[in-house]
Image (cartoon, helix red, strand yellow):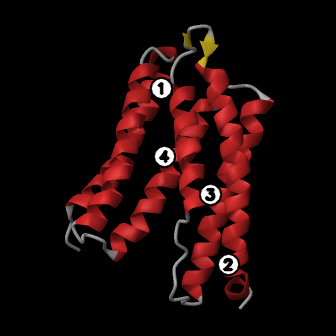
Amino acid sequence: MILNVATILTISRIIFIPGIAFCYIYNNGELRNLAAFIFLLALVTDYFDGYIARKFNQETPFGAFLDPIADKLLVVVTILLLSRTFDSIFFLIPSLIIVSREFLVIAIRQRLAEIRVLVPMRVNNLGKVKTAFQMISLFLLLHPNIIISFINLHTIGLLLLFIAAVLTVISFIYYVRNSWDDILR
């Protein structure tokens, strides 16, 4: 396997995860702003790995395999970290929906790989919008309780997480509908 810039960016996203976790839990959250910054840096690598892969013809089967794993790890670990802070049904329900969907999509992809379906599940625009809401919400929730001009960004983060959960269900239905016949083979 030859590593290219796009794949290195994807790998770096995975490497950032322990840094996010450490900064989030260190000394009861003393470095949560740094955790949010590292998370933001991981989001930037997510954008650029795809852009570079397409623009400079660096798309590889390994990169296509690793990119969604890096995204899922980033989301699931961040939600687990946030569960230490947010003891609320408004955080729990959307988080359970998002994490469950991530595992179910992994199962579907595994099933499709087992039966050697040649057309992989591609990310659609709805999935990209869902991911944007999800990542922005997690970024806002990683910060300590911040208020800007009487607007509590955690409340906005929770609202965006709820919207992401709704989009998660819709995009999951899309994935299942498009691969149902193959899944049942």
In primary-sequence order, the first of circles 3 and 4 is: 4
Q: Amino acid at mark 1?
A: Tyr
Q: Residue at x 69, y 68 (%)?
A: 174
Answer few, some or many: residues within 10 Å of disc 3's Cα (few below 14, many 20 plus, some between 14 and 19). many
Q: Residue at x 50, y 51 (%)?
A: 73
Q: Are marks 1 and 4 in contact (CB under 8 Å)?
A: no
In primary-sequence order, the first of circles 1 and 3 is: 1
Q: Residue at label 2? A: 178
Rendering quarter of residue 90: top right
Residue at the top extreme, as displayed: 150
* Residue 29, horizontal then vertical, whole percent: 49, 18
In primary-sequence order, the first of circles 1 and 4 is: 1
Would residue 139 be found to the left or right of residue 169 on screen? left
Which of pointers 1 and 3 indicates the residue nearer the eye? 3
Q: Are marks 2 and 3 in contact (CB under 8 Å)?
A: no
Q: Amino acid at mark 2?
A: Asn
Gap between marks 2 and 4, in whole Å? Answer: 26 Å
